[in-house]
Image: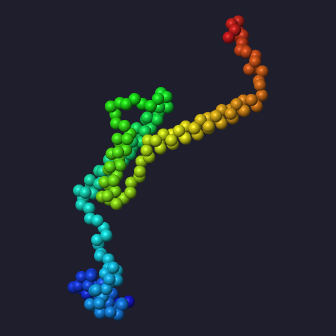
Amino acid sequence: MYIIMSKKSNPWVNHVRNFAKTHNISYGCAISNPDCKSSYHKIGTSTKKVSIADNKKINDEEEDLKYYEKTYNNVLLSNAISNAVTGRPPKNTKFETPNSYLVKYNLLKNQLEKKTGKTYPTLQSETDFKKQNKKAEKQMLKADKEKENIRLKETANRPIEPSHFAGIIRKKKPSGLIY
């Protein structure tokens, strides 16, 4: 394969010349050949240039995205704790609901994915969180029951000491008082 490079010609012309040389056709035939056109790749156009201000704005938006994710998870967890302690869901307060943070997160996530081309994690829904929480609660209850059964078996197998039935042992002081 011969590579012909000219200092004054542009990359497209060099590509057409090399294509013509490797396929043993003339320059005119090579320039009209669809294979020549499809095999050419522009150099330096694959990366997207982002200004410093845009880059700073993207970083700020990514920090906001992390904030929404953290806040959403905290609100879900606090609602679960409140429900576990009181036995009922939390009352509607002046604070925002978890779904409002989820909506804000998803809007910002979609904007950032368009700008940067990166993929960001998808947050689990409130119902998925509750399902996961119920599974964890069942597993914890099962583990507690197993621990209690093991403790009961250990105490049942332990020999009974006579001091358990003797009551309080009293000693007499030299002064004559019993304590």
Q: Is residue 88 above or below residue 25?
A: above
Give how far across and how far down residue 39 sits, in percent. 34, 80
Q: Is residue 69 left or right of residue 167?
A: left
Placement of 112 over or under 22, stated as above or below: above
| Left or right, residue 75 beside residue 146 | left
Residue sticking out furthest to the left: 8
Quadrant including the C terminus: top right
Q: Residue at x 32, y 50 (%)?
A: 108
State which quadrant residue 100 falls in: top left
Depth order, front residue of 69/20: 20
Q: Residue 78 is drawn in which quadrant?
A: top left
What colouring method underlies this structural image?
rainbow
Q: Is residue 136 left or right of residue 179?
A: left
Q: Is residue 47 visible?
A: yes
Give the x, y percent position of residue 31: 28, 86
- Across and down, in percent, residue 6 comes to 25, 87
For the N terminus, the quadrant is: bottom left
Which residue is nearer to you in this view: 169 or 152?
A: 152
Residue sitting at x 75%, y 18%: 165
- 137 to 17, vertically: above or below: above
Rendered location of residue 117, percent (x, y): 34, 60
Q: Residue at x 47, y 31 (%)?
A: 83
Q: Residue shown at 24%/60% (left/top)?
A: 51
